[in-house]
Image (tube, grey):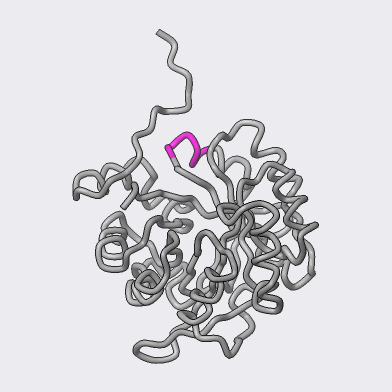
Amino acid sequence: MSNLRLIARLDIKGSNLIKGVQLEGLRVMGDPNEFALRYYHQGADELIFMDIVASLYGRNNLSKIIKKVTNNIFIPITVGGGIRSIDDATEILRSGADKVAINTAAVLNPNLISNISQKFGNQCVVLSIEAKKINQNSWQVYTHSGRERTDLNVVDWAVQGVSKGAGEILVTSVDREGTRKGFDVELVKAISSVVRVPIIASGGMGKPEDLLTVVQDGGADAIAMADILHYKHSDINTIRNFAEQVGLGVRHHESPISHNH
């Protein structure tokens, strides 16, 4: 397995970074640029920006934010929310994003995955899955930032998405999101055991130790963190050091801040 990637996730509404619990009860945290820069300097491997109201309004508004962010941040950036067409994907990638994440539009039109993948390569396409647990070993796909239930089974949908050309899967446990109770390890494991693309686990990280089970037992290749970072319960340096101590492979980071000797 390649090194575990530590990813900061920023959910955006309008021009603000926001944070919810189970994707509801959203609280404004501040300027996404400031947070993005902070996580970059802490040594994040990647950033994920999600426009969480875009699927309701049918428009992703992040290109301005991304253009600004990429002026001084030089790590891979994934952007999701309201990407409904090749044109939308093109605009986001032209703004400086490296990958697009699609959820609602992919559920409505699975061929969108293949279309974007064929044009830009599957490494650019992240299938974003919002999952709610139905019973012991079964999860349902939700769209519109966890608001709309579909009749899709999460594991079946992951397999279909990868066959259509998704190069990566971001799986968010709606039940765990913002709760700080740890990841839904069984959910991640159910997906990682049937697909051969990297899985990013999202939703529930409350302390550095939470990453251990989702990587070792769940098979996650990356973890996306929001609450734990935004509220400063921990930081990426601390989490990286913990991962190293417990023997997980992580990337080594030179601080991006210039050293003057």
Most foreground residue, 112 or 133: 112
Q: Which residue is located at x 66 percent, y 72 percent? A: 106
**Position of 188 compared to 144: left or right?**
left
Question: Is residue 40 on the magenta stretch?
Answer: yes
Can you say whether 6 is above or below 57 in the image? above
User: Where is residue 24, by image quadrant?
Assistant: bottom right
The percent coordinates of residue 40 (x first, y second) are: 50, 38
Can you say whether 87 is above or below 132 in the image? above
Question: Is residue 6 on the magenta stretch?
Answer: no
User: Where is residue 215, by image quadrant?
Assistant: bottom left
Can you say whether 18 is above or below 63 in the image? below
**Position of 159 compared to 33: left or right?**
left
Most foreground residue, 124 or 48: 124
Q: Which residue is located at x 36 percent, y 62 percent? A: 220
Most foreground residue, 159 or 137: 159
Q: Which residue is located at x 32 percent, y 64 percent? A: 219
The magenta stretch spans which residues? 38-43
Q: Which residue is located at x 34 percent, y 89 percent? A: 136
Most foreground residue, 19 or 69: 69
**Position of 29 compared to 205: left or right?**
right
